[in-house]
């Protein structure tokens, strides 16, 4: 296996849109084993929430001086608030974990961490909830990607 597969899997795990939904299928398709792909991508994606929760307030204060940033940030924050608010209101930190665990676009660690920050949730508890959600999402995405690749190989051979 080429080192570039690891590089791209790490990069895709960190990018807000792809996260695990892009990284794990990419790694599996390019020959990485199921367990290494799962462990690498979940570990890297789990780093998003503590880093974001740790630095977002400072970064927001610095960037909010620029008009373009303030407008873009308000749109992003409002979308995160709408998506995260209902499950968190209903289920608390478990709702945050469930939200992150659903492997759909804009429901991963990035949106979960941003939503937790916007809603003023405890950063440590949020990190644990987001990490639990990332683990569940990792299992789901790995299973679907692995089975999909095996099914594709079966039909190509047939």
Image (tube, rainbow, N blue to C red):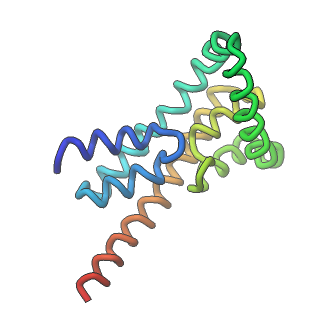
Q: Name which residue lies at 62% across and 27% down.
A: 124
Relative to 14, residue 143 above or below: below
**Residue 32 pos. (x, y %):** 25, 54
**Residue 153 pos. (x, y %):** 28, 77
Q: Name which residue lies at 66% across and 32% down.
A: 114
Q: Is residue 59 left or right of residue 15?
A: right
Q: Is residue 58 left or right of residue 153?
A: right
**Residue 148 pos. (x, y %):** 39, 71
**Residue 60 pos. (x, y %):** 66, 17
Q: Name which residue lies at 62% across and 47% down.
A: 106
The quadrant where residue 42 appears: top left
Relative to 65, residue 133 above or below: below
Q: Name which residue lies at 26% across and 57% down.
A: 30
Please, which residue is most extreme toward the left here?
1
Please, which residue is most extreme toward the bottom here?
158
Q: Is residue 93 left or right of residue 50?
A: right
Taking depth in this image into account, of 137 and 153 the one nearest to the observer is 153
């Amino acid at each position: 296996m080429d080192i570039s597969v690891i590089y791209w899997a790490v990069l895709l795990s960190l990018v807000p849109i792809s996260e695990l939904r892009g990284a794990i299928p990419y790694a599996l398709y390019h020959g990485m084993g199921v367990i290494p792909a799962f462990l690498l991508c979940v570990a890297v994606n789990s780093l998003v929430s503590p880093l974001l929760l740790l630095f977002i307030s400072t970064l927001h204060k610095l960037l909010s001086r620029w008009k373009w940033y303030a407008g873009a940030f308000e749109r992003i924050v409002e979308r995160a608030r709408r998506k995260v608010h209902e499950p968190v209101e209903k289920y608390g930190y478990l709702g945050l974990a469930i939200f992150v665990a659903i492997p759909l676009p804009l429901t991963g660690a990035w949106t979960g961490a941003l939503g937790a920050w916007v809603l003023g949730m405890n950063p440590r508890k949020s990190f644990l909830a987001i990490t639990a959600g990332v683990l569940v999402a990792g299992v789901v995405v790995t299973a679907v990607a692995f089975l999909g690749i095996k099914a594709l190989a079966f039909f190509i051979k047939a």
